[in-house]
């Protein structure tokens, strides 16, 4: 199983739209992907402009399937318009 954490910097003015996009579009689309396990969106307590998306897939191939899917590609422009930068870290789930 693998997990990816993506940290987004979101301007305060875009926060509500970013959260709505995640809950209404991005998350539901990802949930339809083979090998999907879960996704969560977290907002930092001390810095509300920073969000962490934690997504989990059964294996690296499933995660790659999501990243290269037509649906993911179609959602990227709207996602990118809502944030000012992102950092991605991947993990193997060991326990």
Image (cartoon, rainbow, N blue to C red):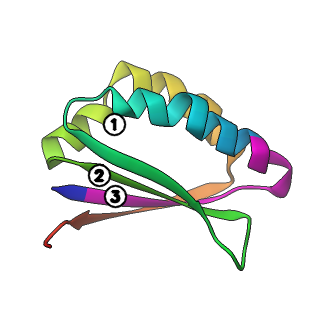
**Label 1 crowd bin: few (<14), some (14–19), many (20+), radius 10 Å:** some
- Give the Cα separation between the discs numbered 2 and 1: 13 Å
Q: Quadrant of residue 3 in the image?
A: bottom left
Residue 4, numbered circle: 3
Q: Position of residue 10 (x, y in %)?
A: 71, 55
Give the residue at x 38% y 33%.
30
Give the mark count.
Answer: 3
Q: Which residue is mark 2?
A: 56
Give the residue at x 58% y 37%.
23
As rendered, which of 62 and 94 lies closer to the eye?
94
- Give the Cα separation between the discs numbered 3 and 2: 7 Å
Instruction: Tell me if 92 is positioned left or right of 45 in this view.
Output: left
| The residue positioned farthest toward the right in the image shown | 13
Instruction: Tell me if 27 is positioned left or right of 46 in this view.
Output: left
Q: Position of residue 49 (x, y in %)?
A: 73, 64
Which stretch appears magenta? 3-16
Q: Earlier in the sequence, mark 3 or mark 2?
A: 3
Q: Position of residue 19 (x, y in %)?
A: 67, 45
Q: Is residue 76 above or below residue 1?
A: above
**Magenta stretch encompasses residue 25:** no
As rendered, which of 12 and 28 lies closer to the eye?
28
- Give the Cα separation between the discs numbered 3 and 1: 12 Å
**Magenta stretch encompasses residue 6:** yes
Q: Which residue is mark 1?
A: 67
């Amino acid at each position: 199983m693998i997990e990816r954490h993506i940290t987004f910097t979101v301007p305060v003015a875009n926060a509500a739209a970013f959260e709505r996009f995640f809950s209404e579009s991005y998350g539901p689309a990802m949930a339809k992907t083979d090998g999907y396990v879960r996704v969560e969106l977290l907002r930092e307590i001390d810095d509300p402009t920073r969000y962490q998306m934690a997504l989990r897939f059964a294996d690296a191939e499933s995660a790659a399937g999501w990243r290269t899917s037509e649906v993911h590609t179609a959602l990227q422009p709207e996602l990118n318009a809502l944030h000012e930068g992102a950092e991605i870290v991947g993990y193997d789930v060991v326990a």
